[in-house]
Image: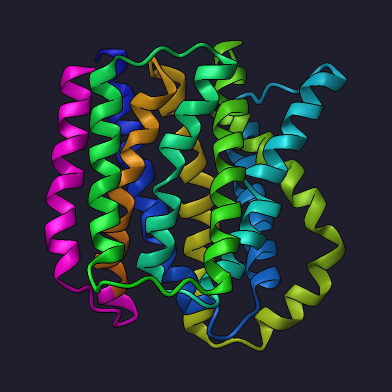
């Protein structure tokens, strides 16, 4: 199996569990606050990753610089990112949140161009832009934009996750395997959340079974396994943009999941924008 195929499979698996996190988070946030959900996701995911990591022979960082990079990953991809992401979902629909997060590939590509000199052919930029135009059609279909505070929280989350992608890529290029990257980034994020654990446990204990189920899915699949898949994809990608462009699929998957799980029915904009997104993604990977 070629590295390109491995990167594509890893990216698709990631999108499957990350995009469904949008509606599942909406379910959980009906009964717990954004901080509680963030703590549960990060701590639960870190516990699972430590078990997987120990079983696979986890590499332990040997320098303060390595630990510093994992602390940055713990902030930008886990604890702080989760708090910001969930705070945004408190006031905007799951599909809208996923659309804002679809800005991540362009932001990451620009950062990678500066940090890693990741060259992307002009045709790659063309299809990156057309993919975002598909996203814009989805959000602008009704002719107006009502931007609540949650949109700004989500925009901040998008920037944080772009930084996570850049730092993750750097560790992957230095030989850090996906399990190691996912484990220690979640572990450092879990350490940051410890002061809020007791309050979060009390809030979760009072929540109904549906909230528990959503939290378990988010912690074990969307957080733990999702970050393993993502690190795996970045490890085998020739360029960061080869993987991050798959995030344009998130609005489509999230909108479908939101319609099924929380009754958020998409309008005609999704049916027009989705083919543009999918077609752009296909052409990007064919002509890159």
Image location of residue 76, percent across then percent down: 66, 43
Q: Residue at x 82, y 20 (%)?
A: 65
Q: Is residue 110 above or below residue 157?
A: above
- Kindly indicate the quadrant of the structure image that contains residue 251: bottom left
Does the stretch in magenta take in 28?
Answer: no
Q: Is residue 229 visible?
A: no
Q: Is residue 61 visible?
A: yes
Does the stretch in magenta take in 261?
Answer: yes
Image-based side of 103 in relation to 209, left or right: left
Q: Residue at x 51, y 40 (%)?
A: 227
Image location of residue 171, percent across then percent down: 62, 19
Image location of residue 30, percent across then percent down: 53, 84
Q: Main secondary structure of the magenta part?
A: helix
User: By what rule are the colours in the image chosen?
Assistant: rainbow
Q: Is residue 266 above or below residue 245?
A: below
- The stretch in magenta equals 259-288
Image-based side of 71 in relation to 20, left or right: right
Q: Residue at x 17, y 18 (%)?
A: 287
């Amino acid at each position: 199996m070629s590295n390109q195929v491995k990167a594509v499979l890893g990216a698709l698996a990631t999108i499957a569990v990350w995009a469904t996190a949008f509606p599942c988070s909406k379910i959980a946030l009906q009964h717990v606050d954004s901080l509680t959900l963030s703590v549960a996701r990060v701590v639960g995911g870190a516990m699972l990753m430590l078990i997987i990591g120990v079983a696979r022979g986890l590499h332990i960082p040997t320098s303060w610089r390595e630990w510093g990079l994992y602390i940055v990953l713990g902030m930008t991809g886990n604890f702080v990112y989760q708090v910001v992401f969930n705070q945004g979902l408190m006031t905007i629909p799951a599909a809208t949140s996923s659309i804002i997060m679809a800005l991540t590939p362009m932001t990451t590509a620009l950062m990678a161009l500066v940090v890693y000199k990741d060259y992307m052919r002009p045709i790659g930029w063309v299809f990156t832009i057309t993919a975002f135009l598909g996203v814009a059609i989805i959000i602008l279909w009704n002719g107006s934009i009502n931007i609540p505070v949650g949109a700004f929280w989500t925009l901040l989350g998008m920037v944080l996750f772009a930084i996570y992608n850049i730092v993750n890529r750097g560790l992957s290029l230095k030989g850090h395997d996906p399990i190691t990257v996912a484990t220690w980034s979640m572990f450092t994020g879990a350490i940051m959340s410890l002061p809020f654990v007791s309050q979060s446990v009390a809030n979760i204990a009072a929540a109904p079974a549906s909230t528990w189920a959503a939290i378990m899915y988010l912690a074990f699949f969307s957080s733990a396994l999702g970050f393993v898949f993502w690190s795996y994809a970045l490890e085998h990608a020739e360029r960061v943009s080869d993987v991050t462009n798959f995030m344009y699929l998130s609005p489509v998957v999230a909108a479908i999941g939101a319609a099924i799980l929380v009754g958020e029915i998409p309008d005609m904009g999704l049916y027009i924008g989705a083919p543009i997104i999918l077609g752009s993604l296909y052409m990007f990977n064919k002509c890159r």
